[in-house]
Amino acid sequence: MRLVLAPMEGLADNVMRDALTRVPGVDWCVSEFIRVTGSLLPRRTFTRVVPELRNAARTRSGVPVRVQLLGSDPVSLADNAARAAELGAPVVDLNFGCPAKTVNRHRGGAVLLEEPELLFQIMSEVRKTVPAQVPVTAKMRLGVNDTTPAIAAAQALCSGGAAELVVHARTKQQGYRPPAHWEWIARIAEQVTVPVIANGEIWSVADYLRCRQVSGLQDVMIGRGLVARPDLALQIRSAAGEVALWHWADMLPILADFFAEVRRKVEPKHAPGRLKQWLGYLRRSYPEAESLYGELRTLLDPDAITARLLRPPAR
Ligand SMILES: Cc1cc2nc3c(=O)[nH]c(=O)nc-3n(C[C@H](O)[C@H](O)[C@H](O)COP(=O)(O)O)c2cc1C
């Protein structure tokens, strides 16, 4: 079983990846996408989005981080993929799932799913250019407005040389609206010869088990579910899958460190917002997060927030 932290631009940055991988259970992370628009990007662009490249492409807890690129031009994607590999990316991942309007308008992300020939060209050019020992993988949705392109897109990516596919089981039009259509992951997996990883709407062990049953796959990528429940991978790994192995008190030092890192790396005016963003997810899983989230409205002084996080729980 492989459990992966999903790439999430603006949410799972390196500070969040560091925090989430302090809880055991995640096999690897995928970086936020690096947008490739035609030129060879400077090395600093890669290390800005993926600072882990300076740490042998690992989070502080030693979990590998793969580098994700987004674009539509085969040659410049290939050149930038080769640069990512040269900088130490263990795997280069290509994003064919982004639904963002500006990205799609510039022919990137999910819209390319309707162009299997271009998908093939991109993947083969990138595969040809990146050193053979560095796998190239892809992340896709099921289509743009409907699922018609799903199988052809997956096959094109695999024929082009993708070593693995992550399938986010929704179309672009479905955005992030539940449910995720895991049955489509099974259909795709039947039609390709590379390993497939299931993705979409796994928030609990029960969701994982249902996804496994419907998709027929053990390996999953989890995004928002891990932000909301940082021990979800650990729970899934626990034999019964029902015991909470991580408690709210275990989260507090991680939250305090996360906030300290955010204060070091993010503009001060955005720092409390970042903590609030995470607490917004955590309160789905931990009732204790609710009061902290409520207090943040009045508690905008960063030192007070840190002190509050580290205060021993009331008896
Ligand atoms: C805030 C946010 C940002 C995202 N950014 C990316 C991204 O940079 N690259 C990518 O391939 N997918 C991105 N995604 C999609 C996720 O990787 C994942 O496919 C999606 O959230 C479904 O998984 P989940 O239900 O487990 O969250 C993003 C999702 C969210 C919510």
Image (cartoon, rainbow, N blue to C red):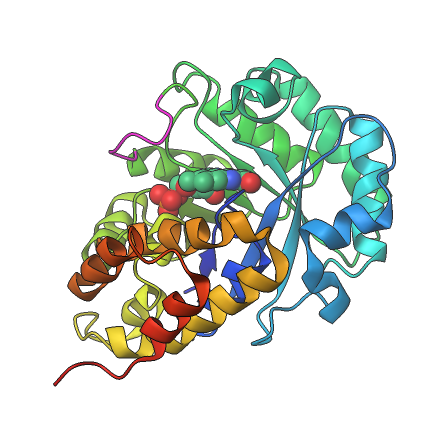
Residue 229 occupies quadrant: bottom left
Note whether 91 is above or below 138 in the view shown. below
Quadrant in the picture for residue 159? top right
**Magenta stretch holds residue 26:** no
Q: Reply above or below: 160 against 247.
A: above
Apparent side of residue 74 relative to residue 195 in the rendered image (left or right)? right
Above or below — where is 236 with respect to 126?
Answer: below
Question: Residue 225, how many percent across, how many down?
Answer: 33, 53
Q: Residue at x 37, y 75 (%)?
A: 307
Q: Position of residue 292 (x, y in %)?
A: 25, 61
- Residue 201 figure quarter: top left
Q: Quadrant of the C terminus?
A: bottom left
| 55, 77: nearer the viewer | 55
Residue at (48, 26) in percent of width and height: 151
| Magenta-colored segment: predominant secondary structure | loop
Relative placement, left or right, of 178 versus 78 is left
Provide the residue span drawn in magenta.
174-180
Give the x, y percent position of residue 162. 65, 42
The N terminus lies in quadrant: bottom left
